[in-house]
Amino acid sequence: MRQFSIKVLLLTLLISPVLHAQEPKHDLERAFYKEYSFLLKEKKAMQSRIQQLKSKQQAEQKTAQQELEMLQSESDALRLEADRINDQIAVVERETLAKASNQGVFEATLEQASATLKQPGDPKLTGIEETISEGVMILKQNTSIHTKPNQAYFLQDGSEITGDIVYYGGVARFGLSNQGQGPLAPAGGGAFKLWEQDDSGSIEALAAGNLPETIPLFLFDSPTQEVAFVEDKEVMAVINSGGIIAWIIVGLGGIATLLALLRAFFLFGLGRSSRKEVVNISESVAQGNLDQAKQQANRIGGSIKRVLSSTLSNLHRDREHVEDIISEAIIHEHTHLDRFHALIMVVAAISPLLGLLGTVTGMIETFDIITEFGTGDPKLLSGGISIALVTTELGLIVAIPVLVVGTILSSWSNRIKDELERSALHVVNQYQNHRSVNE
């Protein structure tokens, strides 16, 4: 609107000179005011029109916003309704699947019950009532004490006999016959064997309907699974199950035991000395009787004899020289005192490693068997597992006592060395004191 007014004003200014030249001054002013009034009226009319259009636009925009909000609300309501319907459909589908699954489980359970309740060769149970009645009958048999005559079972020597079998529910059975009676154990294939002989009369009382105070019985999980007699393994059988590595470990254990005994014998011989005899030698030195002290040292024997003899022979030298001689004599005895120590500790160190080697070897063998035959038969895996476990056990059995004995012998050797040094220095001190008193 402002641009339009400016254009009109410019046009008026341009034509005003012409009008001024052609008309008188008062006519020009009159025309100008008339034109200006007209333009003002047009401006007001246009501003009013613009205001009306803005009001109309705002009203239409508000109406459209309200309609949009209403449509949005309707859309949200429809979406919620769709979600609810989908949830109902999902629930119905789950119920349908559950009913179908229950139907399958029921049919499988009925089939399994029919196969379990009936022995091979018997007619198959075809209905629910037959299955339930058969199950109730078996349940009664498994919860009561009853006797079946003329039943076959095996004695402990393997011979088959015929006699009465007393059923103690479904967890224990007793054989009753003149040839042998006692609790029965599953022998496989539905057969039973005599577990142990019982002549106490308790089985006859049980068969007669009287429950005795005590009765020996063998409880079993299934009458069709054979019970294996577990025999105690001998030491040689255990070692053989570990293979060649187990024998190597046992051999090293024997060698370590022999070396430990020899070293203990040597230490006993090298270190035998009487504290009283050492005191007597010291007293002889203190009195100046070196010849008598040497004779007493020769009677002792062992490492103490050699160290004291060397000390007594060099007492006339200066103290530092004598101490060097004592140290040299004790070092010379190290070879005898530490004999076999390194070998014993080596056996203690390598025995667990050999056990670990046997473990790795046994596991490799086990995995080879699994790769070739699978895991259906556990007996095929027993060889490799035996090597894996037995060798580790033997390695620890050898290593632990050998390590303990080796440490004890090493401490014994160190005590002998300390005793040698202490005894020799005591003799030197006694000699030094005697010389000081005489001087």
Image (cartoon, helix red, strand yellow):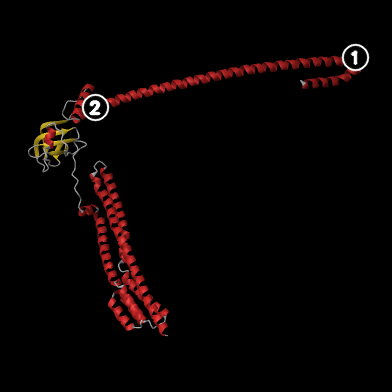
In the picture, which quadrant includes the C terminus? bottom left
| Residue in front for this viewpoint, 31 or 209 | 209
Q: Is residue 279 above or below residue 164?
A: below
Whether residue 303 appears in this view of the structure is no
Residue drawn at x 38%, y 24% as measured from the top left: 94
Q: Residue furthest bottom?
A: 439
**Mark 1 → mark 2, Cα distance in angstroms:** 124 Å
Q: Position of residue 246 (x, y in %)?
A: 25, 56
| Residue in front for this viewpoint, 103 or 28 | 103
Rendered image quadrant of residue 44: top right
Of pointers 1 and 2, the one earlier in the residue sequence: 1
Q: Is residue 357 above or below residue 172?
A: below
Give, as a three-letter code, the residue at label 1.
Asp
The crowding category of the residue bearing disc 1, from other C-alpha atoms within 10 Å (few below 14, some 14 to 19, many at least 20), is few
Disc 1, SS:
helix
Q: Which mark is residue 400?
A: none
Q: Is residue 291 above or below residue 9?
A: below
| Residue in front for this viewpoint, 420 or 157 | 420
Disc 2, SS:
helix
Give, as a three-letter code, the residue at label 2.
Glu
Q: Is residue 44 left or right of residue 128?
A: right
Label 1 sits on residue: 27
Q: Position of residue 299 (x, y in %)?
A: 28, 78
Q: Residue furthest left?
A: 178
| Residue in front for this viewpoint, 405 or 206 | 206
Task: Say which of marks 1 and 2 sits in front.
Answer: 2
- Residues under numbered marks 1 and 2 in contact, where contact means CB atoms less than 8 Å apart: no
Rendered image quadrant of residue 184: top left
Residue drawn at x 44%, y 20% as measured from the top left: 85
The crowding category of the residue bearing disc 2, from other C-alpha atoms within 10 Å (few below 14, some 14 to 19, many at least 20), is some
Q: Which mark is residue 111?
A: 2
